[in-house]
């Protein structure tokens, strides 16, 4: 009987979430065991590995565990050595739908909040001042007609584009790795020159590290707002926050950081700087949504069908 090894457990996952995943495996005629310790290799072998982003699946792990398939419960997959998987004939897939809607909603909320300069409206209200007369100087902007650069057109980036289009925004889609219809892409530097807002949705591909460098941040139009719900190493958050405080950038929303937990959270805080603890993908019911995607992947593998969201 084939065994599923659940290696690692995310901070938000409960015992009920893992019990649900176990029931999924058993319903398909598989056995299931959990190894929450990510500091050392689990004992024995397993035909299926289900892992979180905190687990590094490298060649050593592959040779020790000898899986036939790897399922990462995350949308990102930089923790998987896909070349090593391909060399060993191991299939791998991801679960991008479980968090998609939550990240998209977080992104839209951040764009709206930053463009509307709600911080400058809330502060006087909290002080008891009716600051309606300040609105012309605050210059709140709507999404309709705003030029918004969407960097990365994967599952989440494309969905962000769909929503922004429906709300009347002018898209500046950027994706040097996967240029594809229905969004004809523009070069990143062209988007930087024109954008009223920029939102990052690129994967942590080596070519994307430092994509929004300090120089590119300084090249953004005055008043541009920046949102990063993708990966922390795509952008320099310290420079971005400094540019907000200096009045060059109109706002910043950061959910991901180069180091997590980010040790400089308090130092980067400022009006119109929104900092959240890698939380954009979480809403109530995430564990059940992850289990559903794992179920779909396991079911496809048991039936000999192509894995959904296959990586290799």
Image (cartoon, rainbow, N blue to C red):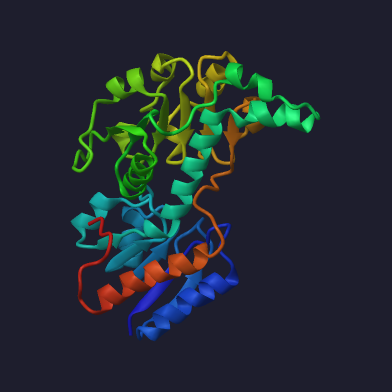
Which residue is painted at 53% across and 70% down in the image? 17
- Residue 270 in the figure: left or right of residue 70: right
- The C terminus appears in which quarter of the rendering? bottom left
Looking at the image, is 200 positioned above or below residue 194? below
Whether residue 257 can be seen here: no
Residue 223 rendering spot, x and y as whole percentages: 49, 19
Which residue is painted at 20% across and 43% down in the image? 182
Residue 109 rendering spot, x and y as whole percentages: 52, 41
Q: In which quarter of the image is residue 57?
A: bottom left
Residue 19 rendering spot, x and y as whole percentages: 53, 76
From the viewer's side, name the closer residue of 214 and 198: 198
Looking at the image, is 308 positioned above or below residue 29? above
From the viewer's side, name the closer residue of 121 and 269: 121
Q: In which quarter of the image is residue 212?
A: top left
Which residue is painted at 33% across and 40% down in the image? 165
Looking at the image, is 290 positioned above or below residue 106? below
- The N terminus appears in which quarter of the rendering? bottom left
């Amino acid at each position: 009987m084939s065994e599923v090894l659940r290696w690692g457990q995310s901070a938000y996952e409960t015992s009920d979430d893992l019990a649900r995943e176990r029931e999924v495996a058993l319903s398909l005629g598989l056995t299931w065991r959990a190894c929450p310790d990510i500091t050392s290799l689990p004992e024995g072998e397993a035909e299926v590995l289900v892992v979180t982003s905190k687990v590094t699946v490298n060649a050593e792990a592959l040779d020790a565990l000898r899986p036939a398939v790897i399922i990462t419960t995350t949308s990102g997959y930089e923790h998987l050595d896909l070349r090593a998987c391909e060399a060993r004939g191991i299939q791998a897939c991801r679960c991008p739908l479980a968090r998609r809607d939550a990240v998209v909603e977080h992104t839209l909320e951040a764009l709206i909040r930053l463009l509307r300069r709600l911080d400058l409206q809330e502060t006087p209200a909290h002080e008891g001042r009716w600051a309606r007369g300040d609105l012309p100087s605050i210059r709140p902007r709507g999404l309709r007609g705003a030029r918004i650069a969407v960097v990365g057109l994967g599952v989440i980036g494309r969905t962000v584009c769909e929503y922004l289009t429906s709300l009347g925004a002018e898209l500046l889609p950027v994706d040097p790795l996967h240029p594809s219809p229905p969004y004809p892409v523009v070069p990143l530097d062209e988007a930087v020159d024109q954008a009223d807002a920029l939102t990052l949705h690129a994967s942590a591909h080596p070519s994307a590290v430092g994509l929004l460098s300090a120089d590119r941040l300084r090249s953004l139009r005055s008043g541009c707002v920046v949102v990063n719900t993708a990966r922390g190493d795509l952008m320099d958050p310290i420079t971005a926050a400094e540019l907000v405080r200096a009045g060059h950038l109109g706002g910043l929303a950061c959910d991901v950081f180069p180091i997590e937990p980010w040790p400089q959270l308090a130092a980067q805080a400022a009006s119109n700087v929104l900092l959240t603890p890698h939380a954009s993908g979480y809403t109530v019911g995430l564990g059940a949504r992850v289990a559903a995607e794992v179920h779909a992947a396991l079911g496809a593998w048991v039936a000999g069908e192509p894995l959904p969201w296959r990586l290799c």
